Image (tube, rainbow, N blue to C red):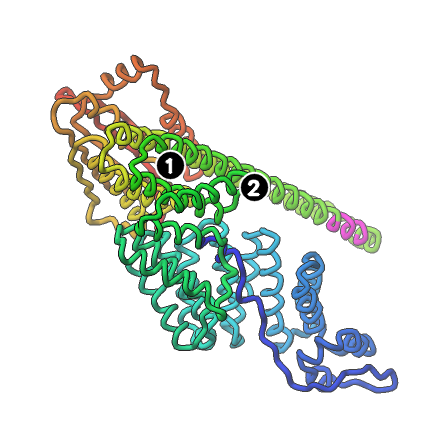
Amino acid sequence: MKVLLFFLSLLIFSPVFSQKEEIVVFNPEKKYTQEFIDSIGNFQLGLDTKEYKKMLESDKSLLGWPKYYRAKAKSLYYKKEYYDSVIYYANKGIESYTNAKVKRPIDEEVLIEIYYRKGKTLLFLQDYENSIITLQKGLTLTKKYPYKRVAYILDGIASNHLHLGNNSTALNYYLEISKDSLDMSVPSSSVTTYNRIGVLYEALGDTKSAKHYYKKGLEVSHRANYKVMNAYLYGNLGEISRNEQKIDSTIYYYKKALEARKAKENVDTYSSPGFAVVQKSYIKIYEGSVQEAIDSLNTIVENIKSLETINMDDKSLMLLAIETLALAYEKQGNASHYSHLFNETVEFLNKFHEKQLEEDLANLEIRYQTKEKEASILQLEEKETQQATILKQQKTITYSLGGFLIVLLGLIVLFWRQRKLKTQYEKENLEQRLLRSQMNPHFVYNALNSICNLVEKKSNETIPYINKLANLFRLILTNSREELVSLNDEMVTIKNYLELQSNFYSSFDFSINVDDDINDEEVVIPPMLMQPFVENAIVHGFTNNDKRGKIIIDVSKQQKDNLILFKISDNGVGYSESVNVKAVKNHTSVSGDIVKERLTILKKKFKVNTRFIIRQPELGGTYVELYLPYLKD
């Protein structure tokens, strides 16, 4: 429910300056001065772009072309169907300033909005990397020229990072927006910003901060009588209470959300109506109308299953509906529906991941083709310039031509090498994301096996397990989208996983020790590489072990080699015995192969000796050393 809101740009309107409102009409008999040209305001220019252009063309000495191109890009930007034209005029505006012999501050200041329009258009076209670069150029100029709508630029950069899965970076930008007193004085902007901050804190596992900002959004909403997002904010608070298993609070917030949806001043256009159905169903379950809730929830599940394409909003709704169905079946005492329900979950997640991989591959191909095309155009332009120079100065630069060609050849070789390295990096980065996504189905399969065991035993711990598993899924799905995550985030995920397994799967103790000289908030590492070894210790180390299991994880820094060392030890049956047991059961592990492939790619990328070593002490158990690269954030 939260993701769709992120992908909508609520702050797309731009500042409007109005110095004069009379119509500007070109007079061919008039001699226009620079002072008059500069006095024409943005509002006038937006109405009379053609007339302004005629004025500039009437005298080649007149300056002001960046302002003309800004007006063209701005007018086309609002039509939302001429994206190529917006970028064209934005580039012309930047080029006109760059090539001008006289570079005036008044023209350079215009570039701020040009960069903003171009950057937001690139965001709509899903060219996130170039959008960030463009918006950052505009943001840099705001340090030199005060710009009242800096929050719009920050919002654009944050939205790009959201699409790229960089939640931590996006959060920092939204926190920066929350400090902008001008933007936050507008109720719609402040409520939207507080909600986005809350959603990101929740996604990063900080529910306390998430609730704080959701409630700040509601405070502004009630104070300013701006109730458009009340249903959304109450719904988010309800989901947090639900994850915390606070039934009364969940019902309270869900009812408030449903009341807000009915209010005339609240038109909820930010989420699927399916979320309201889930909220109603949850309330009905505890009011005794369990079968009615089941019928409504099954309708949602079937509708989403019939979709050809699945977005993040559909995924969130599907998982929430299935989780609520599990609660309904539990209340009804109908354990036979669990297996079918979990099969639906796995099938849906697989479909979602397959679609996500297809989109990643398609985006990579588009970016590659675009860069190839741009490179070809650049080479053609360079060649034409070179030929013109040779024809014009052939008699005077005969001896210098040889040196010029050598330098040009060196530049071409350097350009080709840089492009090759960048393409290789993008390929390796995509491979990393593909390999990370392969680990999710492997973990889901093992987790669902645990759930099936609880269902067969008709255990009262089934629903608590599902709730905790859902929270862990959120962390894993968040981390798996990141190329690097903080050491703290990775340790929180591992800790949650160990707590989950120690309570429900196998009885064992565990401890996690991080050296004092490591700042786990600043150090970032590749995610989801420790989990297979921890999982192996639990599933294959303690299953046939009579004594109480114990897992110890020690984290230290290898300063000399620029590596983080993870020592994972257990007192289970030992690695060789675990291998024998798996062979008897015809078990094939894919996670080990995936870890090896990922470490190979990381070794090439970071130029360090990434590796893992498995040892079996004489006294029993298994001892694993995992060496990973790290950076300081």
Q: Can residue 633 be seen from the camera position used here?
A: no
Q: Residue 440, position in %: x, y?
A: 40, 35
Which secondary structure class fits the magenta region best?
helix
Q: Which mark is residue 203?
A: none
Name the foreground residue: 451 vs 72: 451
Check disc 2 and report its element: helix, strand or loop: loop
Q: Left of 278 or right of it: where is 105? A: right
Q: Which mark is residue 309?
A: 2
**Point 55% across, 39% down: residue:** 306
Task: Tell me which segment is drawn in magenta.
Answer: 381-389
Q: Give the residue type at disc 2.
A: Thr
Label 1–label 2 contact, CB within 8 A:
no
**Point 80% across, 82% down: residue:** 25
Q: Is residue 338 above or below residue 16?
A: above
Quadrant of res 349: top left
Q: Give the residue type at disc 1.
A: Val
Residue bearing the label numbered 1: 608
**Callout count:** 2
Q: Residues within 10 Å of mark 1 (few under 14, many from 20)?
A: some
Q: Left of 81 or right of it: where is 193? A: left
Q: Left of 161 or right of it: where is 70? A: right
Instruction: Please name which of the two marks, 1 or 2, marks the residue nearer to the observer.
Output: 2
**Point 62% across, 78% down: residue:** 106
Q: Residue 445, position in %: x, y?
A: 37, 30
Name the foreground residue: 400 vs 271: 271
Q: Residue 495, position in %: x, y?
A: 24, 42
Q: Residue 219, position in %: x, y?
A: 36, 72
Q: Can residue 177 be seen from the camera position used here?
A: yes
Q: Is residue 620 above or below residue 515?
A: above
Q: Is residue 135 magenta?
A: no
Q: Is residue 385 magenta?
A: yes
Name the foreground residue: 516 vs 559: 516
